[in-house]
Image (spheres, grey):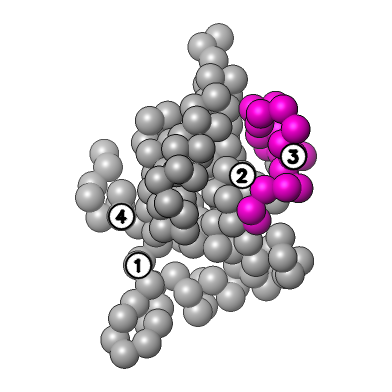
Amino acid sequence: MNSPKRSQARSAARLAAVQALYQLHMEGTAMTRLLDEFHQHRLGREIEDGEHYADAEVEFFDDLVTGVAARREEIDAALTAKLAGGWTLARMDKTMLQVLRAGAYELMARADVPLGTAISEYVDVAKAFFDDREAKFVNGILDAVAKEARKPD
Protein backbone atom coordinates (compact mmCIF):
# COMPACT_ATOMS: atom_id res chain seq x y z
CA MET A 1 0.00 0.00 0.00
CA ASN A 2 1.33 3.42 -0.91
CA SER A 3 0.89 5.97 1.82
CA PRO A 4 1.22 9.68 1.03
CA LYS A 5 4.39 9.76 3.17
CA ARG A 6 5.94 6.86 1.20
CA SER A 7 4.93 8.54 -2.05
CA GLN A 8 6.63 11.78 -0.96
CA ALA A 9 9.72 9.84 0.14
CA ARG A 10 9.93 8.18 -3.26
CA SER A 11 9.45 11.52 -5.05
CA ALA A 12 12.30 12.95 -2.98
CA ALA A 13 14.42 9.88 -3.79
CA ARG A 14 13.82 10.38 -7.53
CA LEU A 15 14.85 14.03 -7.42
CA ALA A 16 17.94 13.23 -5.33
CA ALA A 17 18.83 10.34 -7.67
CA VAL A 18 18.81 12.69 -10.66
CA GLN A 19 21.10 15.06 -8.75
CA ALA A 20 23.42 12.19 -7.78
CA LEU A 21 23.50 10.87 -11.35
CA TYR A 22 24.36 14.35 -12.59
CA GLN A 23 27.24 14.51 -10.12
CA LEU A 24 28.37 11.03 -11.16
CA HIS A 25 28.24 12.04 -14.84
CA MET A 26 30.03 15.38 -14.41
CA GLU A 27 32.60 14.51 -11.74
CA GLY A 28 32.95 10.73 -11.91
CA THR A 29 32.63 10.46 -8.13
CA ALA A 30 33.16 6.88 -6.93
CA MET A 31 29.80 5.20 -6.29
CA THR A 32 30.39 4.40 -2.61
CA ARG A 33 31.56 7.96 -1.94
CA LEU A 34 28.65 9.42 -3.89
CA LEU A 35 26.03 7.37 -2.02
CA ASP A 36 27.67 8.13 1.31
CA GLU A 37 27.71 11.86 0.54
CA PHE A 38 23.99 11.83 -0.24
CA HIS A 39 23.16 9.67 2.80
CA GLN A 40 25.20 11.85 5.16
CA HIS A 41 24.66 15.33 3.79
CA ARG A 42 21.65 15.54 1.49
CA LEU A 43 18.77 13.14 2.10
CA GLY A 44 16.55 14.70 4.77
CA ARG A 45 19.33 16.97 6.02
CA GLU A 46 19.18 20.68 6.79
CA ILE A 47 19.92 22.96 3.86
CA GLU A 48 20.05 26.26 5.73
CA ASP A 49 18.05 28.27 8.25
CA GLY A 50 15.90 25.33 9.30
CA GLU A 51 14.97 24.26 5.76
CA HIS A 52 15.49 20.58 5.05
CA TYR A 53 15.83 18.38 2.03
CA ALA A 54 12.77 16.14 1.89
CA ASP A 55 13.12 12.75 3.52
CA ALA A 56 13.84 10.23 0.79
CA GLU A 57 13.37 6.49 0.71
CA VAL A 58 17.06 5.58 0.94
CA GLU A 59 16.86 2.04 -0.47
CA PHE A 60 14.87 3.31 -3.45
CA PHE A 61 17.38 6.15 -4.00
CA ASP A 62 20.28 3.69 -3.84
CA ASP A 63 18.58 1.34 -6.31
CA LEU A 64 17.95 4.14 -8.79
CA VAL A 65 21.52 5.45 -8.69
CA THR A 66 23.30 2.09 -8.73
CA GLY A 67 20.81 0.60 -11.19
CA VAL A 68 21.26 3.41 -13.72
CA ALA A 69 25.04 3.15 -13.38
CA ALA A 70 25.01 -0.64 -13.80
CA ARG A 71 22.66 -0.65 -16.80
CA ARG A 72 23.70 2.61 -18.44
CA GLU A 73 24.55 1.12 -21.85
CA GLU A 74 21.20 -0.68 -22.03
CA ILE A 75 19.33 2.42 -20.84
CA ASP A 76 21.17 4.71 -23.25
CA ALA A 77 20.42 2.35 -26.15
CA ALA A 78 16.71 2.38 -25.24
CA LEU A 79 16.69 6.19 -25.02
CA THR A 80 18.68 6.66 -28.24
CA ALA A 81 16.16 4.49 -30.10
CA LYS A 82 13.38 6.92 -29.09
CA LEU A 83 15.11 10.19 -30.03
CA ALA A 84 14.18 12.04 -33.19
CA GLY A 85 16.56 11.69 -36.12
CA GLY A 86 19.76 13.66 -35.72
CA TRP A 87 19.53 13.80 -31.93
CA THR A 88 22.04 12.06 -29.74
CA LEU A 89 22.36 11.70 -25.99
CA ALA A 90 25.66 13.60 -26.21
CA ARG A 91 23.80 16.70 -27.52
CA MET A 92 21.27 16.59 -24.70
CA ASP A 93 21.31 18.80 -21.62
CA LYS A 94 23.15 16.80 -18.93
CA THR A 95 20.41 17.22 -16.32
CA MET A 96 17.75 16.17 -18.85
CA LEU A 97 19.81 13.10 -19.67
CA GLN A 98 19.85 12.03 -16.01
CA VAL A 99 16.07 12.55 -15.70
CA LEU A 100 15.56 10.29 -18.73
CA ARG A 101 18.07 7.68 -17.53
CA ALA A 102 16.49 7.43 -14.09
CA GLY A 103 12.99 7.27 -15.58
CA ALA A 104 13.98 4.65 -18.12
CA TYR A 105 15.67 2.56 -15.43
CA GLU A 106 12.56 2.67 -13.27
CA LEU A 107 10.38 1.61 -16.22
CA MET A 108 12.77 -1.19 -17.16
CA ALA A 109 13.69 -2.53 -13.73
CA ARG A 110 11.01 -1.59 -11.22
CA ALA A 111 7.88 -3.48 -12.22
CA ASP A 112 6.60 -2.77 -8.69
CA VAL A 113 6.12 0.88 -9.71
CA PRO A 114 3.06 1.48 -11.90
CA LEU A 115 3.95 2.73 -15.37
CA GLY A 116 1.85 5.90 -15.10
CA THR A 117 3.33 6.73 -11.71
CA ALA A 118 6.90 6.41 -12.95
CA ILE A 119 6.29 8.60 -16.00
CA SER A 120 4.39 11.33 -14.14
CA GLU A 121 7.00 11.40 -11.36
CA TYR A 122 9.81 12.07 -13.85
CA VAL A 123 7.70 14.69 -15.63
CA ASP A 124 7.48 16.36 -12.20
CA VAL A 125 11.25 16.01 -11.69
CA ALA A 126 11.78 17.61 -15.11
CA LYS A 127 9.54 20.52 -14.07
CA ALA A 128 11.90 21.17 -11.13
CA PHE A 129 14.64 21.98 -13.66
CA PHE A 130 12.92 22.90 -16.93
CA ASP A 131 9.79 24.44 -18.42
CA ASP A 132 6.70 22.63 -19.70
CA ARG A 133 8.16 22.00 -23.15
CA GLU A 134 10.96 19.89 -21.73
CA ALA A 135 8.56 18.17 -19.31
CA LYS A 136 6.43 17.14 -22.32
CA PHE A 137 9.59 15.82 -23.99
CA VAL A 138 10.29 13.65 -20.91
CA ASN A 139 6.70 12.40 -21.02
CA GLY A 140 6.99 11.46 -24.71
CA ILE A 141 10.36 9.71 -24.45
CA LEU A 142 9.48 7.77 -21.29
CA ASP A 143 6.10 6.79 -22.72
CA ALA A 144 7.89 5.37 -25.77
CA VAL A 145 10.44 3.55 -23.56
CA ALA A 146 7.59 2.14 -21.44
CA LYS A 147 5.92 0.60 -24.48
CA GLU A 148 9.10 -1.45 -25.03
CA ALA A 149 10.06 -2.05 -21.41
CA ARG A 150 6.63 -3.07 -20.15
CA LYS A 151 5.37 -5.12 -23.08
CA PRO A 152 3.00 -7.86 -21.96
CA ASP A 153 4.60 -11.25 -22.51
**Image quarter (top left, top right, bottom left or bottom right) of the C terminus:** top right
Could you tell me if the residues under marks 1 and 4 are in contact, i.e. CB atoms within 8 Å?
yes
Residue under the point 55% across and 24% down: 144
> On screen, 50 above or below 66?
below
The residue pinned by badge 2 equals 101
Of pointers 2 and 3, the one earlier in the residue sequence: 3
Residue under the point 40% across and 82% down: 47
Disc 1 marks which amino acid?
Ala
Rendered image: mark on residue 137: none
Q: Residues within 10 Å of mark 2 (few under 14, many from 20)?
A: many
The residue pinned by badge 3 equals 88
Task: Report how far apart the C-alphas of labels 1 and 3 lie in the structure.
Answer: 33 Å
Q: Secondary structure at mark 1?
A: loop
- Point out the frontmost of discs 2 and 4: 2
Disc 3 marks which amino acid?
Thr
The residue pinned by badge 4 equals 8
- Region in magenta: 73-94
| Side (left or right) of 6 relative to 66 | left
Residue under the point 72% across and 27% down: 85
Task: Report how far apart the C-alphas of labels 2 and 3 lie in the structure.
Answer: 14 Å
> On screen, 50 above or below 106?
below
Q: Residue furthest bottom?
A: 49
Task: Report how far apart the C-alphas of labels 1 and 4 lie in the structure.
Answer: 8 Å
| Side (left or right) of 23 relative to 103 | right
Q: Secondary structure at mark 2?
A: helix
Between residue 72 and residue 90, name the one nearer to us. 90
- Point out the frontmost of discs 3 and 4: 3
| Side (left or right) of 94 relative to 114 | right
Q: Secondary structure at mark 3?
A: loop
Of pointers 2 and 4, the one earlier in the residue sequence: 4
Q: Residues within 10 Å of mark 3 (few under 14, many from 20)?
A: few
Of pointers 1 and 3, the one earlier in the residue sequence: 1
